[in-house]
Amino acid sequence: MDVQTAPDATASRTINAAPDAVWAAVTDLASIRTRSPETFAARWTRGDGPAAGARFRGWNRNGPFVWATTCTVTDAQPGASFAFDVTFMGMPVAAWRWDVAPDGDSSRVTLGTWDRRERFMRVLGTAGSGVADRASHNQAGIEETLRRLAAALES
């Protein structure tokens, strides 16, 4: 992921939880369905937890459209960051990054994504996911994900 380039979609939120608790929730693949409006399942396929080089498979849904991706962890700093690259059939799709920073007794959580699809994958992605405007779709999804994460951790 080119951190010099602004993400295509991003949002931040202060969550009333310690950074380690936020990071543990973000990297818990078994609970992803409770916070993501699009990803309904994920499981580790290489490695057994969040570490650079580990891989997981993610299953996504948008209405009647269902698809799976392969994700490779690029950064995993406990309590601070979790990032991964997403591919479909070996082709780049996106990079996602979570950053968690202490904010008093709370945490400032930022989630962003960078679209990495070539033209062919953009067309295939629209047909396979039913999403024509991926940036707007991801923006809404990120905001909902952060809302759900806060609700889970602050309850």
Image (cartoon, rainbow, N blue to C red):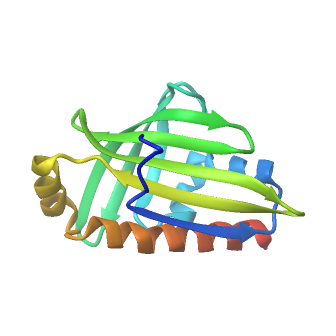
Does 101 sit left or right of 149 as displayed? Answer: right
**What residue is shown at x 52% (from left), y 74% (from top)?**
144
For the C terminus, the image quarter is bottom right
The N terminus sits in image quarter: top left
Q: Residue at x 40, y 64 (%)?
A: 38
The quarter of the picture where residue 147 lies is: bottom right
Q: Position of residue 20 (x, y in %)?
A: 79, 48
Number of labels in the image equals 0
Residue lying at the far front in this picture: please name it: 4
Whole-percent x and y of residue 119? 12, 50
Is residue 21 toward the left or the right of residue 9 in the image? right
Position of residue 101 in the picture relative to residue 72 (left or right): right
Residue 151 found in image quarter: bottom right
Residue drawn at x 30%, y 39% is 87
Residue that protrudes farthest toward the right in the picture: 105
Q: Can you say whether 93 is above or below 154 in the image?
A: above
Tell whether 138 sits left or right of 123: right
* 115 shown above or below 126: above
Image point (60%, 29%), residue name: 51
Q: Position of residue 78 (x, y in %)?
A: 72, 38
Q: Quadrant of residue 14?
A: bottom right
